[in-house]
Amino acid sequence: MSSSVSTATITPRTSNKSGDIMNNTAGKEEASPAGDGGADYDRFFWTYTEEPHRSRRQAIIKAHPEVLKLCGPEPLTFPLVLAVVSLQVFCAYALRDTAVLSWPYFLTAYVVGATANQNLFLAIHEITHNLAFKSPLANRLLAVVANLPIGIPYSASFRPYHLTHHKSLGVDGLDTDLPTALEAWFLDSVAGKAFFATFQILFYALRPMMVYQLPLTWIHAFNVVAQLAFDYILVKYVGGRALGYLIMSSFLAGSLHPCAGHFIAEHYVFGQHSRSLDAAAAKTAAPEETYSYYGVLNFFTYNVGLHNEHHDFPAIPWTRLWKLNEIANEFYRDLPCHHSWVGVIWQFILDKEVGLWCRVKRKEGGRKVGGTAGHAQPMN
C-alpha cells in the first residue's frame, strides 16, 4: 500500500536530454508565483495544494489508531541533555591551555564538539515540540540549558520559527527553512553551493530574521541573559579558549560535518527523487518535499533522519519514531529516502542539477506561530 498524500499542480519544468525531470524553468509569467523575477530568476518547484503530511497523518491514524499512543514526552531526553552539556563543558575546560591553531584543538572540536553540539541543536528541536516534559515552561527552561554549550543564544527564537516551519511547510514568506530566490540565484554554482554547505549554520541563523521578525518575550530575554552569564563565567574562570572551543564546535556542527548533512537532506529535491515521477505524473504532481534517512548517524541526532515520520507526527518523540515506521511501514517504505548524509553534501555541491532551487514552495497555506503560544498538534 502506498502512502496517501495530496497531489499538487506545479509549474512546468524542463527535462534534460534523457528526459529526467529538472527544476522549474517555465517561461510563462503566470507559472512563477514569485512574480517579477520570471523563470530565469525563480526555478523552485511551485505547488498549489497543501503539504502532504496532514493527509498522510490522517490516513495513518485511520489505518493504525494505535500510533496515537506513541505521542507524548520522552523522559530520557532530560538526562541525555545534561550528559552532553557536561561533556562539552569538560572538553572546553580540558582545552583551556591548548593553542587554538593546533590539531588537538581542531580535531576535538570537529570530532567531539561538533557532534555534541549538533546533538544539542536537535535536543532543542525535540524540546521545541514539548517532548522532554509535559510542562511547556519546563521544556523552555531545558532548551536554555541545552543552548549553553552552543555559545550563542538561539533556543527561544528557534521555537516559533521551527513550529511555523511545521505549520507552514514550503509556504513562501513563512517557512524560513526555505532559501530565498536571491540565495538560490547568487549561490547557483559549485563554488556557491560549497560556500553554502560550509557556512550553512549562518544561513539558518540569519535568514529567519531577514524573512520576518518575532516579538521579543521574556523567554528570549532569559535565553540571552543566561547565555551571556554562562559565557562570561566560562571566560573569566576557564579562559577564552574554552569559549572559543564551544563556538568552533557550533560552527563545525553546521558546516562540512557528516551530521550536518541532515540540514540539506530533509527537504531538498535531488535528481534521483524528481526522476521517480514519470512523464505523466510530472505534469500534475510535485516531487516529495520531505525525505528520511535511516542510517547510523541517527544515533547521534535524536533520530532526526526519520524526517517524514517526524513531520507526520511532531508529537511523537525521537525514541518512538522507529516504532511509528514499523507500525505504519506501508506508508513509508516506498517513499524516496537518503542513504548517506555525507553523500548528500557531496552530491549537493557537485551535481549541477541540484542546488538551492530544488525546494518545493507554495504561496498560501499554514500559519505563523509566534510569541509563547502553545504548540497544538492537529491529530485529525
Image (cartoon, rainbow, N blue to C red):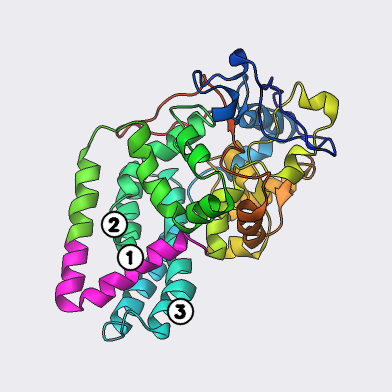
CA gap, disc 2 to disc 1?
8 Å
Mark found first going from the N terminus, 2 or 1: 2
Q: Quadrant of the N terminus?
A: top right
Residue type at mark 1?
Ile
Numbered label attached to residue 79: none
Rendered image quadrant of residue 268 = top right
- Judge by depth and name the residue closer to the eye, 242 or 27: 27
Numbered label attached to residue 152: 2
Mark found first going from the N terminus, 2 or 3: 3
Numbered label attached to residue 247: 1
The answer to whether residue 257 is above or below residue 92 is above
Within 10 Å of disc 3 (Cα), the crowding (few <14, some 14-19, many 20+) is few
- Judge by depth and name the residue closer to the eye, 88 or 360: 360
- Judge by depth and name the residue closer to the eye, 71 or 161: 161
Image position, residue 33 (x, y; %): 55, 19
Residue numbers of the magenta segment: 229-256
| Residue at the extreme left | 236
